[in-house]
Image (cartoon, grey):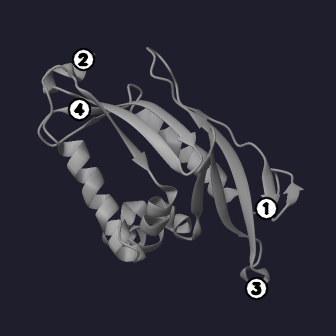
């Protein structure tokens, strides 16, 4: 990936679009990607503001521009500014996340431990809106797509089968299903 954050974000966007729309076998071919959180962070900082500018429905994601994501074994680590900007405090929330590749499996996302620097803080502390918003958005995604299938423009579906985190990468397994898969 390019070193420049804007170029890196654009490369991530192109790579994801290419993988998601790639024509695959008719039987629901499974495939996977591994994403470096640095790529997501570059996208959040450089591309998300442009998406928000051109799509007003995305305005609720504006706070995510300041969020940074890391991946650890079994969890996402979300870092975001906390409290008054003049203090320059950054808080982190460790969010265990998992989606098993099994029939009926649901996305598990818990807001785990929170800290400012090395200081643990209660999760009810002001400033954890980013973690709560992420959890809310993922829950909304689950309600909107209970079968975790997203319809492509050509009628095919991309199904999210599994999500896992390990140090330095987020792994997501998908299957591309034919248009006839709408019912199941």
Q: Earlier in the sequence, mark 2 or mark 3?
A: 3
Mark closer to the observer (4, 1): 4
Q: CA distance from mark 1 to mark 3?
A: 16 Å
Q: CA distance from mark 2 to mark 4?
A: 11 Å
**In-image side of 62 versus 74 (left or right):** left
Q: Residue at x 31, y 67 (%)?
A: 10
Q: Which residue has dot 2 on it?
A: 183
User: Which residue is nearer to you in this view: 115 or 126?
Assistant: 115
Q: Mark 1: which secondary structure?
A: loop
Q: Earlier in the sequence, mark 1 or mark 3?
A: 3
Q: Position of residue 28 (x, y in %)?
A: 22, 23
**In-image side of 177 versus 38 (left or right):** left
Q: CA distance from mark 4 to mark 1?
A: 39 Å
Q: Which residue has dot 3 on it?
A: 86
Q: CA distance from mark 2 to mark 1?
A: 43 Å
Q: CA distance from mark 3 to mark 4?
A: 46 Å
Q: Residue at x 46, y 16 (%)?
A: 104
Q: Are marks 3 and 4 in contact (CB under 8 Å)?
A: no
Q: Position of residue 175 (x, y in %)?
A: 29, 29
Mark closer to the observer (2, 4): 4
> To which quarter of the image does residue 46 belong?
bottom left
Q: Which residue has dot 1 on it?
A: 126
Q: Mark 2: which secondary structure?
A: helix
């Amino acid at each position: 990936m390019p070193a420049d954050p804007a170029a890196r974000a654009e490369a991530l966007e192109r790579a994801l679009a290419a993988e998601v729309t790639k024509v695959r076998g008719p039987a629901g071919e499974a495939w996977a990607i591994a994403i470096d959180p640095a790529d997501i962070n570059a996208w959040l900082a450089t591309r998300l503001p442009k998406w928000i500018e051109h799509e007003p429905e995305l305005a609720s994601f504006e706070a995510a521009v300041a969020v940074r994501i890391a991946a650890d074994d079994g969890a996402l680590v979300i870092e975001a500014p906390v409290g008054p900007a003049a203090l320059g405090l950054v808080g982190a929330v460790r969010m265990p996340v998992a989606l098993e590749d099994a029939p009926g499996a649901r996305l598990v996302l818990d807001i785990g431990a929170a800290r400012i620097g090395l200081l643990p803080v209660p999760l009810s502390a002001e400033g954890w809106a980013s973690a709560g918003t992420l959890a809310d958005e993922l829950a909304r995604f689950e309600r909107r797509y209970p079968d975790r299938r997203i319809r492509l423009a050509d009628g095919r579906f991309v199904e999210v089968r599994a999500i896992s985190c390990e140090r330095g990468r987020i792994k997501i397994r998908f299957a591309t299903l034919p248009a006839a898969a709408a019912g199941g």
